[in-house]
Structure formats: structure tokens, C-alpha cells
Image (cartoon, helix red, strand yellow):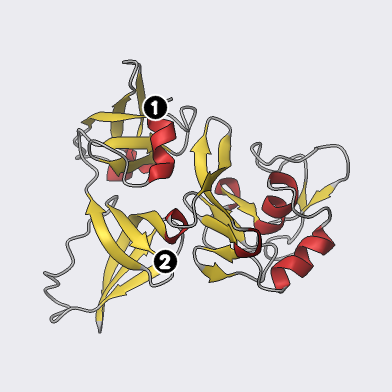
């Protein structure tokens, strides 16, 4: 009888190229568990601790540290060492007073050091929203859901979020403090494709009629006047005239 379902193992060679691992030291590597981010857009927490931060030497040691509740992801204790972490996720190590945010780069994702104050703020992109019996359920890019209670679910005038809008959220309460529309003139970072990590101003967004809006072509121009074309699904707005969080200022000024 043939095997059903996906395997729980992952070899090093086909692992995402941006993972900072040696490809020929051993055959296997930790595979992220099913969760908020896809395999190609995430890193398992144990690799963050071992390879990217170097705070542990082995997976066994990483498991012990994580199981003791010493690592927080987006303001919450995470005790699974294979949990996937991805774009804009915040890794907190309160015991050593170190905080990081996963940011896009030309290689994929990297850890940007941030302050303790900024570790309580993040940006989430709205991916979808649906009406439920007690309100509106908003799905964001990191896999989490936000339930917004409204007076009339059939006419949710209180919810003004649209797909691709950016929500500035405070942790751990997960309260929306600011919103940003994805539109021409805004600053944005490219999160996928060959131009991943490029930052600039949205010059043009294609008007779609015969294809899905996620596939709409977007033109982004950086500070040097260089233009990059991508699709709307790879565009993450970060501010109007200035970034909404301090971590992104370094990207804009590159």
C-alpha cells in the first residue's frame, strides 16, 4: 500500500536556499511543523536559535531552552522547537534582553535586532476576511486570525480593512493601532521573487479585470530611481512617506 500524506522529514539539499545551514555535513535538517508560514517562507525556531543566533549548539539544547518558555514569538511563549517563523515575526529572548524581527533581504529572510519597545509592535498584511455569526474574521499573512465584533455582521461598517491593507498591531494584546492602504505613492518592500528585499515607492498598480488581483503587476521605484516590477502578492506596504516601524528605516535608506 502506498504511503499517504506528507513526510515529516526534510533533507538538507532541497531545504530553502536562504537557510544558513551546511548542505553536506549531514543528510537531514529540522522540518518546520505545519503552521503560520509555508516551508519556503519560514525558518524552524530551532534553526533560528542554533544557526542564526548561535545561542545554542545542538537541537537538544535548543529544545530544552524553548521548552522552558525562554523564547517568545510575537509576544507569546513558544514551546515547539520546529514552529515556523517568517516575515515580520518577532523573536524575543527576555533573559538576555535581545529582540529580533525577521525581515526580507535579497537572500530571503534575516534577523534584524530591535529594541525591547519595538518588540511589542508589528505589521500584519490582511490576506482575507469573512463574516461569521458574531463579527468579521480577518486573516493576516502570519497565519493568525483576528475576530472583530460588529453590531450587524451582515453590514459590518466598522471594519474598513481590505485585502493587502497593513495593520500596525501591538503585542501581546494584538490590538490594531494604525492601518495603511496599499496604494500608489506608498513605501513598500518586495517579499518574493527575484527582487525580494527591494524597497521603494509604489509607482503604479495594474488595474485588473481578467485576472486575479494578486497577480496584478506593480512597479516600485527605489531611492536611486531604479525600477522593479513584481506582482501585488509580493508587495508589503510599510508606510506613506516614512516607515511605520523603526526597523524598516534601514531598508529605505540603503
Question: What residue would you read off at disc 1?
Answer: 253
Give residue 223's mark. Answer: none
Q: Regarding mark 2 in the picture, which secondary structure is present there?
A: loop
- The foreground one among 224 and 158 is 224
Residue 212 in view, yes or no? no
In the drawing, does residue 94 fall left or right of residue 20? Answer: left
Where residue 171 sits in the image (x, y, percent)?
42, 66
- At 43% from the left and 54% from the top, the residue drawn is 118
Dot 2 alpha-carbon crowd within 10 angstroms: few under 14, some 14 to 19, many 20 or more: some
Sequence order check, earlier mark of 2 and 1: 2
Q: Quadrant of the C terminus?
A: top left
Where residue 74 sits in the image (x, y, percent)?
50, 63
Q: How many marks?
A: 2
Question: What residue would you read off at disc 2?
Answer: 171
Rendered view: 104 above or below 93: above
Residue 183, by quadrant, is top left
Rendered view: 68 above or below 160: below
- Residue that protrudes farthest toward the top in the picture: 225
Where residue 151 sits in the image (x, y, percent)?
14, 82
Where residue 203 sits in the image (x, y, percent)?
23, 27
Dot 1 alpha-carbon crowd within 10 angstroms: few under 14, some 14 to 19, many 20 or more: few
- At 61% from the left and 69% from the top, the residue drawn is 78
- At 23% from the left and 79% from the top, the residue drawn is 149
- Residue that protrudes farthest toward the right in the picture: 25
Q: From mark 2 to mark 1, how far is it between C-alphas?
A: 27 Å
Residue 58 in view, yes or no? yes
Q: Regarding mark 1 in the picture, which secondary structure is present there?
A: loop
In the drawing, does residue 201 fall left or right of residue 228? Answer: left
Rendered view: 91 above or below 211: below
- At 24% from the left and 36% from the top, the residue drawn is 186
Q: Quadrant of the N terminus?
A: bottom right
Amino acid at each position: 500500500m502506498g504511503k499517504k500524506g506528507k513526510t515529516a522529514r526534510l533533507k538538507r539539499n532541497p531545504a530553502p536556499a536562504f537557510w544558513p545551514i551546511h548542505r553536506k555535513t549531514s543528510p537531514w535538517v529540522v522540518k518546520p511543523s505545519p503552521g503560520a508560514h509555508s516551508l519556503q517562507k519560514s525558518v524552524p525556531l530551532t534553526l533560528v536559535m542554533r544557526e542564526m543566533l548561535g545561542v545554542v549548539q545542538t537541537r537538544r539544547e535548543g529544545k530544552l531552552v524553548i521548552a522552558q518558555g525562554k523564547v517568545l514569538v510575537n509576544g507569546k511563549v513558544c514551546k515547539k522547537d520546529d514552529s515556523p517563523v517568517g516575515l515580520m515575526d518577532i523573536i524575543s529572548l527576555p533573559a538576555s534582553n535581545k529582540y529580533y524581527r525577521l525581515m526580507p533581504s535579497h537572500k530571503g529572510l534575516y534577523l534584524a535586532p530591535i529594541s525591547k519597545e519595538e518588540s511589542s509592535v508589528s505589521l500584519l498584511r490582511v490576506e482575507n476576511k469573512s463574516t461569521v455569526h458574531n463579527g468579521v474574521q480577518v486573516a493576516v499573512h502570519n497565519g493568525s486570525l483576528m475576530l472583530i465584533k460588529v453590531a450587524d455582521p451582515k453590514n459590518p461598517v466598522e471594519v474598513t480593512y481590505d485585502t493587502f491593507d497593513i495593520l500596525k498591531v501591538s503585542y501581546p494584546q494584538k490590538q490594531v493601532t494604525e492601518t495603511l492602504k496599499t496604494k500608489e505613492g506608498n513605501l513598500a518592500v518586495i517579499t518574493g521573487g527575484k527582487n525580494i528585499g527591494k524597497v521603494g515607492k509604489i509607482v503604479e498598480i495594474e488595474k485588473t479585470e481578467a485576472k486575479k488581483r494578486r497577480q496584478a503587476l506593480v512597479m516600485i521605484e527605489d531611492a536611486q530611481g531604479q525600477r522593479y516590477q513584481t506582482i501585488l502578492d509580493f508587495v508589503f506596504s510599510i508606510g506613506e512617506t516614512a516607515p511605520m516601524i523603526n526597523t524598516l528605516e534601514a531598508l529605505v535608506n540603503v
